Amino acid sequence: MDAAQVCRDIGDFVVGQALRVGATGCVVGLSGGVDSTTTAALVQSAFASARAEQGLDLELVGYILPSGTNHPRDTEDGLGVARRLEIRHEVHNLEPVIEAYRATNPEAFAHPYDRGNLSSRVRATVLNTKAATEGKIVAGTGNKDEDFGIGYYTLFGDGAVHISPIAAISKRLVRQMARYLGFEDLADREPTAGLEPQQTDFKDLGYRYDAVEVVSEGLAQGLCAEDLFSHEQVAPLVQSQMDEYGRLFGAPKFTRVADVICDIASRNAMARSKAVILHPPMPNVTLAYC
């Protein structure tokens, strides 16, 4: 990836989408993670360029919306990002709002998974309402691996956005972009949705996003799952992540490389189904895969 070129690609897309609907700018949810940080930095950079070059007055507003399952560091890092970008921002604790749903949806509190998805949908409602009342659009923070690799998002939750600035680049490239934009300190932060206590994406999935990337790209290039079981670029990577999982959590979630690849392939098919239900526009970026 040529980071400067992709930064321009995404910036032109964001500004174009805002102008197309007559928006005054974007709102973004800031979690302190690399995806939301990179998204916010890209949007703010685009708006600054549009202001300097075209005299456009577009604004980015950051909303930090923690719930009871978020670590205090999430709020601290989100605030740090907002201050470094010098954007208007607000912090709102969503826990009382989420708890209010016990009156109508008590079933959602029986399992952490359902409560987590409820939290995501509440957060989306707040962001979309803020955007609507300010004449702005919601900039999503999902990357290519999450949104299209395995569909790792909540429908009508973090998937309920107007535009997806980083949906064309993988987690690996999002980290690269974060470093390019000056956020080296957050580039390698452990990914977590913050929807369940002590949740991390790696613990939940059993593999990391670079495995999602290589398997998804293989499938996109016409290979079937069986072709990837012993592929020299895939099998060693997956095995190393299975070993790492075992060291961290006492036992691997998967015992065979083939099982991991089949899980990613299954989620990949699910991701396509979810995208048909609801998929916001994303930019065309300049990439070359070898």
Image: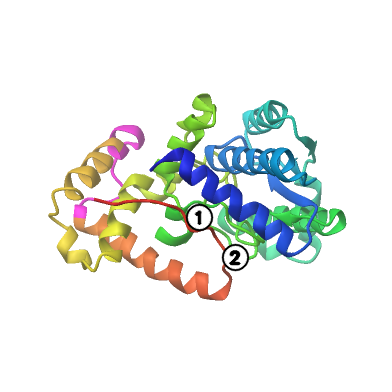
**Splitting the image into 4 quarters, where does residue 188 fall?**
top left
The answer to whether 156 is drawn above or below residue 93 in the figure is below
Q: Which residues are magenta?
A: 245-257
Query: Mark 2 = which residue?
Result: 280
Query: Mark 1 = which residue?
Result: 167
User: Which colour style is shown?
Assistant: rainbow
Q: Label 1 neighbourhood size at 10 Å, few (<14), some (14-19), many (20+)?
A: many
Give how far across and how far down residue 112 sits, in percent.
58, 53
Q: Which residue occupies 48% across, 58% down? A: 284
Mark 2 and mark 1 residues within 8 Å of each other at the beta carbon: yes
The answer to whether 94 is drawn above or below residue 183 in the figure is below
Q: Is residue 250 magenta?
A: yes
Q: In this rendered view, identify the residue nearer to me: 173 or 264.
A: 173
Please say whether residue 91 is visible from this viewpoint: yes
Mark 2 residue type: Pro
Give how far across and how far down residue 283 sits, in percent.
53, 58
Q: Is residue 148 left or right of residue 186?
A: left
Mark 1 residue type: Ala
Q: Is residue 246 magenta?
A: yes
**Splitting the image into 4 quarters, where does residue 265 fall?**
bottom left
The answer to whether 81 is drawn above or below residue 267 in the figure is above
Q: Which residue occupies 13% across, 49% down? A: 232
Q: Which residue occupies 24% across, 50% down? A: 290
Please, what secondary structure does the residue beneath circle 1 have? loop
Give how far across and how far down residue 275 sits, in percent.
51, 70
Please, what secondary structure does the residue beneath circle 2 have? loop
**Splitting the image into 4 quarters, where does residue 181 fall?**
top right
Q: In this rendered view, identify the residue nearer to me: 34 or 98.
A: 34
Q: Is residue 154 left or right of residue 5?
A: right
Residue lying furthest front in this view? 53
Q: Which residue occupies 31% across, 36% down? A: 250
